[in-house]
C-alpha cells in the first residue's frame, strides 16, 4: 500500500482527507449522483403510476406527487451544491472552501 499525504488518512476506501471540509468536497459529487439516480427512479415510477391508473384520480395524484417530490429533491440537492460552490466559495470566501 502506498502511504498517504500528510493531510490524508489511510482507510479501506483509500486515502481520505482528515478535515471535514475536504471530506465533504470529495464525497458530495458521489452523493449528488446517488440523489440523481433515486430521482430518476421515482420519476419513472410516478410516470408508470399515472400511465397505469386507468383514470383513477387517486392513483393519478399519487403519480403526480412522486414526480413533484423527486424533482423537488433533485433541485434541493443541486441548489445545495450551487450554494456551496458559488455563495460560500466565491462570494463569502470562507477559508477552506476553495
Image: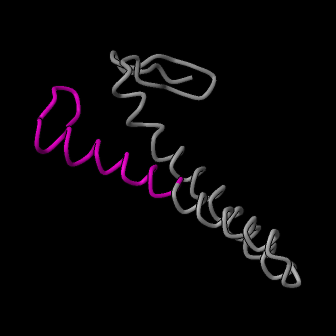
Quadrant occupied by the C terminus: top left
User: Compared to 26, does 52 lie above or below?
Assistant: below
- Apparent side of residue 21 relative to residue 38 in the rendered image (left or right): left
Q: Answer whether residue 76 is magenta in the image.
A: yes
Quadrant in which residue 12 is drawn:
top right
The residue lying at 44 percent from left, 51 percent from top is 76
> Percent from the top left, x then y, of residue 29?
46, 47
Start-end of magenta stretch:
73-98
Q: Tally the numbered discs.
A: 0
> Percent from the top left, x then y, of residue 91?
10, 43
Q: Answer whether residue 93 is magenta in the image.
A: yes
- Apparent side of residue 48 relative to residue 71 in the rendered image (left or right): right
The residue lying at 33 percent from left, 15 percent from top is 6
User: Which color scheme is applied?
Assistant: one colour
User: Compared to 82, does 28 lie above or below?
Assistant: above
User: Compared to 46, does 25 lie above or below?
Assistant: above
Q: Looking at the magenta stretch, what is its main secondary structure?
A: helix
> Percent from the top left, x then y, of residue 28?
45, 41
Q: Nearer the viewer, residue 9 or 49?
A: 49
The residue lying at 41 percent from left, 32 percent from top is 24
User: Compared to 1, does 90 lie above or below?
Assistant: below
Q: Nearer the viewer, residue 91 or 33?
A: 91
> Percent from the top left, x then y, of residue 90?
13, 45
Amino acid at each position: 500500500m502506498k502511504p498517504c499525504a500528510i493531510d490524508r488518512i489511510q482507510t479501506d476506501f483509500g486515502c481520505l482527507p482528515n478535515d471535514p471540509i475536504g471530506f465533504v468536497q470529495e464525497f458530495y459529487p458521489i452523493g449528488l449522483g446517488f440523489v440523481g439516480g433515486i430521482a430518476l427512479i421515482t420519476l419513472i415510477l410516478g410516470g408508470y403510476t399515472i400511465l397505469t391508473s386507468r383514470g383513477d384520480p387517486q392513483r393519478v395524484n399519487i403519480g403526480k406527487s412522486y414526480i413533484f417530490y423527486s424533482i423537488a429533491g433533485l433541485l434541493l440537492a443541486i441548489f445545495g451544491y450551487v450554494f456551496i460552490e458559488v455563495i460560500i466559495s466565491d462570494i463569502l470566501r470562507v477559508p477552506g472552501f476553495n
